[in-house]
Amino acid sequence: MSGATYTWTVTGGAGFVATSTTNSVRVNFKTSTSSTVSVRVTVNNLCGASASKSLEVKVNTACRMVDGEEEPTDVAVENVFQIYPNPASNKVYLEFTSKESETNSVYLFDLLGKAIYSENIDVIKGLNKKPIDLFDIPKGIYFLRLENKGQTLKATKVVVDK
């Protein structure tokens, strides 16, 4: 996300290989003191801070060798899916990660299940950001759904407040 900074934290005695304010981080699990490590990220931009996303990683503290040498293990926090600002008035941004370049579909449904917005979007592998114009959408509660080949990938509530 352009103009954003990412705040990372890690628990359980693990540490960062290097500090990062970008959308990825490397974690060294060889210093873990716990069998469960939590990696957490919060995104900060001009609109404020996002809800934190976290990933729990199970660590085998009894086995820390790879081919006779200790090595840090990389963790990529995937499955980013957020919509902001929410509530919104004229535009929202859908931000999500994709494991491959493909075509997805975005739908906005009213409370009766009627699709009031749909668009096919080409996504890239990695982080994607899609603005969605709400100018002609009346005030109310809606559901946004991201699909790939007819399968729902993610869905969330969107509040339009004009």
Image: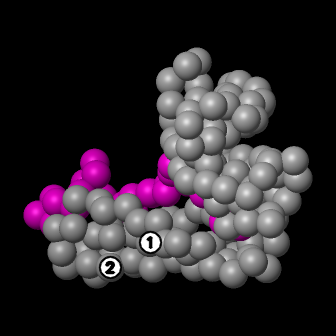
Give coordinates of residue 153: x percent, y percent: 51, 35
In the image, what residue type sits under mark 1? Arg
> Which residue is at a point 64% across and 60% down the rendered structure image?
159
> Which residue is at a point 50% across and 24% down the rendered structure image?
151
Crowdedness near tag 2: few (<14), some (14–19) or many (≥20) residues, C-alpha within 10 Å = some
Left/right placement of residue 74 relative to residue 125 reads left
| Residue lying at the far right of the rendered structure | 135
Between tags 2 and 1, which lies in front?
1
71 or 35, nearer to the observer: 35
Secondary structure of the residue carrying numbered label 1: strand
Crowdedness near tag 1: few (<14), some (14–19) or many (≥20) residues, C-alpha within 10 Å = some
Left/right placement of residue 105 relative to residue 7 reads right
Q: Report the magenta residues as a range.
A: 59-86
* Residue on which disc 2 sits: 11
1 or 155, nearer to the observer: 155
> Which residue is at a point 59% across and 30% down the rendered structure image?
147
In the image, what residue type sits under mark 2? Thr
Secondary structure of the residue carrying numbered label 2: loop
3 or 24, nearer to the observer: 3
* Residue on which disc 1 sits: 40
Q: Are marks 2 and 1 in contact (CB under 8 Å)?
A: yes
140 or 33, nearer to the observer: 140
